[in-house]
Amino acid sequence: MANLNTDLLTPSVAIDCVVFGFHENELKILLLKLKNIDLWALPGGFVHKYVDIETEAHNALELRTGLDNIFLKQFHTFGSIERNDTEHNKMLVEKKVIPEEWFPWFNQRFISIGFYALVEYSQVKEPIPGPISEACEWCSVNDLPPLMLDHEHILTVAHETLKKELNNQPIGLNLLPKRFTIPELQSLYETILGKKLDRRNFRRKVMSFGILVCTNERRTGVAHKAPLLYEFDEASYIKANEAGLSSGW
């Protein structure tokens, strides 16, 4: 197990990252399976004394995903006095998730800075577990395993933030592959929002923003008429995000 040099760490401050991906019409979350127990956790970690918070978050996600250019945004600070759970930390020692000498550090009160990250699912080839985990896997946001402490709450707040920022952040640009169809884009929006959207209205609205470029190529290997493939005009997309894409869907 990796050494925990607490002399280099900032007491009582941690980061938790909600990593979103999109695959087979499902919103996915990257989670870590803790060693020896049926509990999962968000990627994250402690904060080194001489490292910026955002740099620490980027470093943590690069270790888990192998990607060094991830869209990352701070969305909330979690500071409830009830976040700390001594019995939970004792259980981590009992189940040998952490060594006993780590208990005093883990058992202090932690304020966690929440980030959400957006990655293109296929780019994460082999998610990598951390020092107290045995697996790192994508899980459906609609079928979550048991999560440690308040991580389900953190995830829920991140998802609600994603819904609110759908029109002001380059979410499609970061979650979809470079080329995609209009139905795939609509499916992404429906999945994030948790509701069905009218096909004709969605197409009309999204085309009116001037953020898509038609490649004049078609998706191959589909049963019905092959749909056209589009790409984002990145400059136009970012500019449109700044103004806000829509008042509602």
Image (cartoon, rainbow, N blue to C red):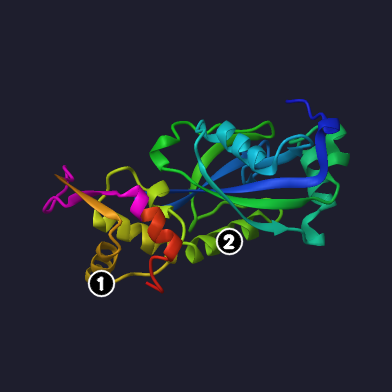
Res 220 seen here: yes
Kind of residue indicated by mark 1: Asn
Q: Secondary structure at mark 1?
A: helix
- Find the residue positioned furthest to the left: 225
Task: Tell me: 56 left or right of 109.
Answer: left
Reading the image, the residue beneath label 1 is: 201
State if disc 1 and disc 2 touch (CB < 8 Å): no
Callout 2 crowding tier (Cα within 10 Å): few <14, some 14–19, many ≥20: few
Reading the image, the residue beneath label 2 is: 156
Residue occupying image coordinates x 61% and y 40%: 33
Which labelled disc corresponds to residue 182? none
Viewer-nearest of labels 2 and 1?
Answer: 1
* Mark found first going from the N terminus, 2 or 1: 2
Residue 225 pos. (x, y %)? 11, 53
Task: Tell me: 164 left or right of 234.
Answer: right
Residue 121 pos. (x, y %)? 41, 42
Q: Is residue 197 above or below residue 131?
A: below
Res 25 seen here: no
Residue occupying image coordinates x 62% and y 46%: 42
Kind of residue indicated by mark 2: Thr
Range covered by the magenta-colored residues: 218-236
Does the segment drawn in magenta span residue 231?
Answer: yes
- The quarter of the displayed image where residue 177 is located: top left
Residue 235 pos. (x, y %)? 36, 50
Residue occupying image coordinates x 26% and y 66%: 208
Q: Nearer the viewer, residue 150 or 46?
A: 46
Does the segment drawn in magenta span residue 21?
Answer: no
Can you say which quadrant of the picture contains the C terminus?
bottom left
Residue 181 pos. (x, y %)? 24, 52
Callout 1 crowding tier (Cα within 10 Å): few <14, some 14–19, many ≥20: few
